[in-house]
Amino acid sequence: MHIVADENIPLLDEFFGEFGRLTRLPGRLIDQTALGDADVLLVRSVTRVSAGMLAGTPVRFVGTCTIGTDHLDLPGLAAAGIEVASAPGCNARGVVEYVLSCLLTFAEQSATPWQDRTVGIIGVGEVGGRLAAVLQALGVKTLLCDPPQASQGREGLVELDELIAHSDVISCHVPLTCEGPHPTWHLLDARRLESLRPGTWLINSSRGPVIDNQALSAVLGQRPDLLVALDVWETEPLVDPALAARCRLATPHIAGYSLDGKLRGTAQIYQALCRFLDRPASLALEQLAPRSGAGQWQLEPGTPPDWALTRALRLVYDVRDDDARLRAMLNRVQDEQESREGFDRLRKEYPLRRECNLLRVVTAASEPQLARRLLAAGFDLGG
Ligand SMILES: NC(=O)c1ccc[n+]([C@@H]2O[C@H](COP(=O)([O-])OP(=O)(O)OC[C@H]3O[C@@H](n4cnc5c(N)ncnc54)[C@H](O)[C@@H]3O)[C@@H](O)[C@H]2O)c1
Ligand SMILES: O=C(O)[C@H](O)[C@H](O)COP(=O)(O)O
């Protein structure tokens, strides 16, 4: 068997070496010619895969080690009889940590406590659902919008315009879709962006085109009261430098880039391939992954209780580091091609980031009440 894979997928040899020959390629360079006689294609989010691309190749299985699937032509691949697998939820925990870090940063920048703000979450699946659970556990008021789930009978959800009208913070966690009953392309368009409440904090770690970036840049030019964090960009890997300058936080699509999240993605696709080939999945992530990050965070003795959670979150992940790296790259590059390459390099050479066992950090800081609240909400951040 011949497997062609994005070189940025970790543990390729360990999980897929036993299947046969492995060819690693930069994800953006995988095309029909590069596939050659491949039977299996393993990608991350930067490789667009359609039935046309696979036509004439022996590829019968496509696995994406990511949550998002908008880079795959799912109907076309299904019609061509090609099996497709993705990795639902694999890096959701990392994205939640990203959003929490954005909240802390905006709170510092605006001298406003984040726990007092109403947080509107658009898309309440793996990521949005976990985010809602942790915020609710912390006593933060949330408004949830998810029309597909509402149409299935889920209660307690609001319409998008109602969410926008009543939220102090808005965080987007929808898939990118252009068709169907609830498309998300330009879900936040000029009209909705203009209607944001004064001082709204807006965070997008879903997909760039969920927000009309040109409209956002124009609105931010008029509305310095809005604090915006963008992890994803409409023209990725190209970042509009003017828009980045108007955002308070700008990062290169790394919200879910914990090592744990990437490894989970690889393991989920390994299991899916074993199922497809009808062979036992003999390898488990626990055997192959480096030891968990739990235990590497320590709060300073005597950390005041009301500061413990903030301190713990900062120890685990600090979005300001990723923001500084992207801005340094944008300042350095001479042209758009260098900018695209710089964006991809920041992702390829991403520093080691481990997910947190927030419960353990907080418990170790003698915060039993907070720990109990997180536990009650099923806020399991690490083993
Ligand atoms: N920046 C990153 O590193 C990163 C990491 C992981 C995921 N993502 C992106 O985040 C997206 C969400 O991830 P997830 O794991 O929560 O996905 P999910 O499929 O579990 O949840 C998405 C939710 O959005 C809802 N939804 C769909 N259309 C909607 C609409 N028009 N309005 C409101 N809600 C709508 C769905 O019903 C679902 O509940 C992914 O599709 C991916 O594109 C980005
Ligand atoms: O959809 C996802 O899982 C994320 O956006 C993922 O982190 C993207 O990472 P990439 O595939 O671009 O390496």
Image: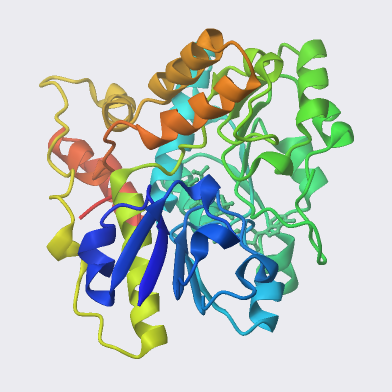
**Quadrant of the image where one finds ligand 1:** bottom right
**Is residue 380 something that shows in the picture?**
no
Q: Position of residue 142 (x, y in %)?
A: 59, 44
Seen at 68% across and 22% down, the residue is 240
Question: Is residue 191 shown to the viewer in this render?
Answer: yes
Foreground of the two, 15 or 161: 15
* Front residue (pair 344, 107): 344
- Outermost residue, right side: 191
Task: State the quadrant of the C terminus.
Answer: bottom left
Residue at x 75% of width, y 71% of height: 151
Quadrant of residue 19 within the rendered picture:
bottom left
Does residue 294 appear to the left or right of 239 in the view shown? left
Q: How many marks?
A: 0
Is 378 above or below relative to 63?
above
Which residue is painted at 35% across and 91% down in the image?
278
Where is residue 49, by image quadrant? bottom right
Which x, y percent locates residue 325? Answer: 43, 18
Specify whether 335 is left or right of 9.
right
Camera-nearest residue between 224 and 82: 82
Task: Give the left or right position of residue 331, taking residue 303 as reference.
Answer: right
> Where does the N terminus fall, quadrant-wise?
bottom left
Residue displayed at 26% across by 35% down: 352
Relative image position of residue 271 (x, y in whole percent): 33, 75
Residue 276 percent location from the top left of the image: 42, 85
The scheme the figure's colours follow is rainbow
The answer to whether 231 is drawn above or below residue 51 in the figure is: above
Give the left or right position of residue 16, taking residue 220 as reference: left
